[in-house]
Image (cartoon, rainbow, N blue to C red):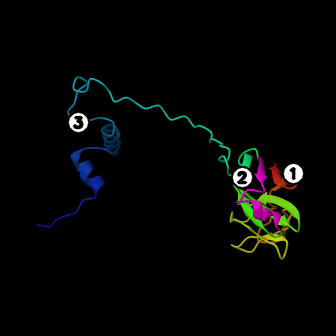
Amino acid sequence: MEQTQLSRGQFLRQLGMSSAALMSFYCLGTTMTACTSASDDPMPAPTTPPTPITPPVVTPPAANSGITGMTTGSIDFTIDLLHPDFKKLKTEGEFTYVADIIIANAKGTFVALSKVCTHQGTTIDFRPTANDFKCPNHGSEFTTDGKVQKSPATTALKVYKAESINSGNSLKISA
């Protein structure tokens, strides 16, 4: 006896079920449970309302960090240049990062820029000998006023106002 192999569709057609009936059965089957009645399940499972989206919490820097003010969101903070973490900034050529900002002493002038390269988001470094900023990833270079001086980056860095205050013992950074 020769065996013939049927496709799934042919098999189901031989059973007398059309594709529309199968789809209806499939769709109903995903929402129904077998062999139960409404009296078997007195309480439907409660539905959980969607969690509301809340904006991120912006927190000020920790106490005694050498920083007062807001380092995220609406940038407006002051750095204590006598604090051990920041006293190196009084030396020409030194730099540090605070949140998403790079702060450098560029030949006696304080400069604050976005630390994120506009090409692919790598953290940039200050080069005191060249008095500029360079991305170590693909070599983009930026001037101390944030302008692109060497590609592949094509967009300037965000510049923040950096002002020496308190007889040179503090540095105020603002948007």
Separation (CA) of disc 3 from disc 1: 76 Å
User: Which of the numbered marks, if any, corresponds to residue 17?
Assistant: none
- Compare marks 2 and 3 and give the one earlier in the sequence: 3
Query: Image quadrant of residue 124?
Result: bottom right
Q: Amino acid at mark 3?
A: Ala
Query: What residue did someone put label 2 on?
Result: 66
Q: Is residue 118 visible?
A: no
Looking at the image, which residue is at 26% across and 35% down?
A: 33
Residue sitting at 82 percent across and 53 percent down? Answer: 171
57 and 52: which one is in front?
57
Identified at 73% across, 46% down, the residue is 68
* Structural distance between the alpha carbons of marks 2 and 3: 66 Å
Residue 86 is one of the magenta-drawn residues? yes
Vertical relation: 65 (above or below) 45: below
Q: Check disc 3 and report the residue beneath it.
A: 34
| Image spot of residue 122 (x, y percent) | 68, 66
- Secondary structure under tag 3 reads loop
Q: Is residue 53 rendered to the left or right of residue 68?
A: left
Q: Tag 1, which secondary structure?
A: strand
In this picture, which residue range is highlighted in magenta?
76-91
